[in-house]
Structures are given as structure tokens and as C-alpha cells.
Image (cartoon, grey):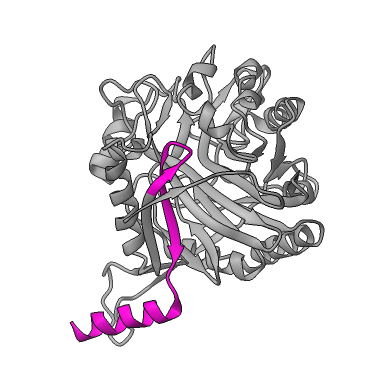
Amino acid sequence: MAESESADNRSGHVSIFAVGDVFVDLDDGVPAFRHATSLLKGGDIVVGNCEGVYSDDPAPSPTTRHSMTTGRSRASCLSAVPFHVMTCANNHIVDGGYRGLADTLEVLREQGIATTGAGMNAKAALRPAVVERDGIRVAFLACASIFPVGYEARDERPGLAAVRIRTHYSTPDPTFWEPGARPLITTSADPDDLRRLGQAIKDARASADLVVVACHWGASSQFETLQSYETEVARQIVELGADAVVCHHHHSLRGVEFWAGSPIFYGVGAFVHHFTHYNPTANQLAASRARYGEFAHGPRPGFPLYPFHPDARMTGIVTLDASKLGIVRAGFIPAEILADGSTEPYRFGDARAGRVFDYLRRMSDTLGAGVTFVEGERDGWAHLNIIQRSSQDAAIRCETQQAG
């Protein structure tokens, strides 16, 4: 079944387009968005994750293994894309030290891009970016659960808004002692960090009609994998008052579900992310490949700017249509990262879109998500309309599975 959709900007409605990691590291970044600009200009609010530092005078980072920094001028293309909001809670935002963080926030704001997720102290890092369109105020918040030690903001120290995760190890059989057995691993959020995020959501809700939360977390070298905390915390964020949750860092797509009526996109992939200065040593490559196999980070023939497994080139744009009452429609426009560092969304009728749609469906099936995917088009672009199944449909599906 196919569905034709209109993206008209009706009174009292707002369209939000969200993408994953963005870090432009070319002298002229405009061509990297040449395939996507006309699409993104159709969104009332466009939000991406600023996955690096733009500074002409970066300082040493507190701790990091790979620095994602470049000059301020290379961010100059972002407002023309256009991005209206950049989330800054991620594992590279303090790669240029506190000076680099300040420069990055400044260069984005100078272009009229609102920021959230990082700041000069913990309170500032949890301050929302609020954008108003057609009388609807949308607040954006961001947090990170994967980052080098020392990147988290404190009361009097710059950094990112952190939701730290505790890792728990237990014996696979509590009735039998077996030293050296592979443990069961579970993860959960630090309760104080989650409480602070919950308060930030509550405060944002008081001054906005909608709240969208971006989460930077997960395993970037383990495809098709969600850690237990990702689903647990994303659902808690919805229960704390978020209308939608959009996650990134994985460098590959993850599934989609609705929780309490709100869409959760568990991984939207990278969007435009340049690894211009990525030069691992032979020992580093060997160690990574020994640990992660084919999904290890490392040079890929023909893709000098994006050293990831071919599946990581599948990406896309989240579409959220909303009124003051909440999200009324959620969807996804598929895209592909190309060899020259640009990203190409697929037009309606492009056969390549089917591969991305199938991948997203498969990732969602692993969640047991009660969602229906309807392929269609949106203003000439391939579009996957994502619909929450009714509780009755879900019950019938469950009974059918049990009977089988």
C-alpha cells in the first residue's frame, strides 16, 4: 500500500526535520548538502547534532582518543542548509577544550542557529533551544551518555548535559557459582542525572507547546544493537514529558517505536560527517578489527571521508508534523552518504529507498515495536509514514504469535 502525502504548512501546524551527526570539515561545505538543501528548506524547523568543534584556537581536551576539530569558517554553511537548531551533547563537543566549546557555540549562534545540550555550566547545558513557528513553540533538549571522562558539565565547569550510565555485571545463573563465566551485562541511568533531565523537560514544557529530546548514545561499532539503557531511558524521557525522542551516535540506523503515544527514533545515523584527519596507526586498526570485526572503524576504499561499514552509509531525515496538541505524524525520508562526503536523499520512485526502508523495518521488528510502515512520498521525496498500531491490533498480533 502506498500513500501520497502533502507537506503543506497549514495554520497551527509545524514540520520538524531531524538528522543525526553533522560535522563539516571541508573548505567549502556547501556541496556536501547540495542534494538535501531543497528538501531541508521544506521543514519549518531543522535540527541536527553538531558532532565536533569549530575553533581557530582550540585548547587541549580533558581526555580523548580522537579529536574532531576544525576551523570556525567551516561551519559557515550550516545556516544556509538551513539548520535552525544544533544539539551539542556528544562525545566530541569538548575535543577542543573549553575554549573550543565556547567558540563552537558562538559560531553557531552567530549564524542564528539555536543550541542546546552543552554550555558553560550544567545549568546552561540543560537550557532548551526554543523555536516558534506558526504560533507553536517547540523546545529542544539534548543529553549524552557516551563521552570521554571530563566532558560532562558541572555546576562551575563547562561541558555537555550528561545522563551517565551505570553498567552492572551479574552471574548468568544466580543459583550456581561459576568463576570466569561470561557475565550478564545490564545498564541503567544515573538517577541524579535522569532527575535533572526530567526537571529540564518539565521547565521546558512550561514555556513551550512541544518538547523534543535528542540523545547521543549507544554502540557505534556494534550494528543492529541497542544497549538495555537505550530503550529504558528513552521511554523514561517520554514519561517525563517529551513529545518525541531522536537518538544518534551509532553511525547506523536503529529501530522506531511509539511509547505512550510518542515516537522514539533509536538511531538516525550520521548525516554529513567528515573524518578528514582520521589516520589510525596499524596497531589501532588491528585492535579495532580484532574487537569489532567487519564493523570496526577503518579506511574504506573510495570513502576517504567516512571510514565506516557500508551499512553505515544508510541514513535519512526524521519528519515530525505537529500541532499544539502534540505530534500528529511521524515519518522518515531515506538517504545515502556518498563517497565525496555529501548526502543524497532519495526521490520518490528511487529503487534504492527500499533497502533503507527494509533495514529500518527490520531494526524496528527487533524491538517488538507496534508500528506500521507505509511507503509513500512527501513533496516528491520517498517517505516512510510510521504509524502506531492500536492496542487492539497489537493484542491480535500477540495472540497470533502465541498461537503459532
**Is residue 107 visible to the viewer in this orientation of the structure?**
yes
- Answer whether residue 194 is magenta in the image: no
Q: Classify the position of the C terminus by image quarter.
A: bottom left
Residue 88 found in image quarter: top right
- Above or below — where is 84 with respect to 242? above
- Closest to the observer: 70 or 28? 28
Going 28% across and 20% down the picture, which residue do you hit?
A: 302
- Answer whether residue 402 is magenta in the image: yes
Residue 338 found in image quarter: top left
> Residue 29: x, y in percent?
53, 18
Q: Is residue 111 left or right of 398 when viewed as pictured?
A: right
Q: How many marks?
A: 0
> Residue 129: x, y in percent?
73, 45
> Residue 284: x, y in percent?
33, 32
- Above or below — where is 247 with respect to 83? below
Q: Is residue 371 left or right of 299 when viewed as pictured?
A: right
Q: Residue furthest top?
A: 27
**Is residue 290 visible to the viewer in this orientation of the structure?**
no
Q: Classify the position of the N terminus by image quarter.
A: bottom left
Q: Residue furthest left?
A: 404
Q: Is residue 201 left or right of 389 when viewed as pictured?
A: right
- Above or below — where is 154 with respect to 175? above
> Residue 399: x, y in percent?
29, 85
Going 37% across and 58% down the picture, which residue do you hit?
A: 373
Q: Which segment did they paint magenta? A: 376-404
Going 42% across and 37% down the picture, which residue do you hit?
A: 381
- Above or below — where is 154 with respect to 71? below
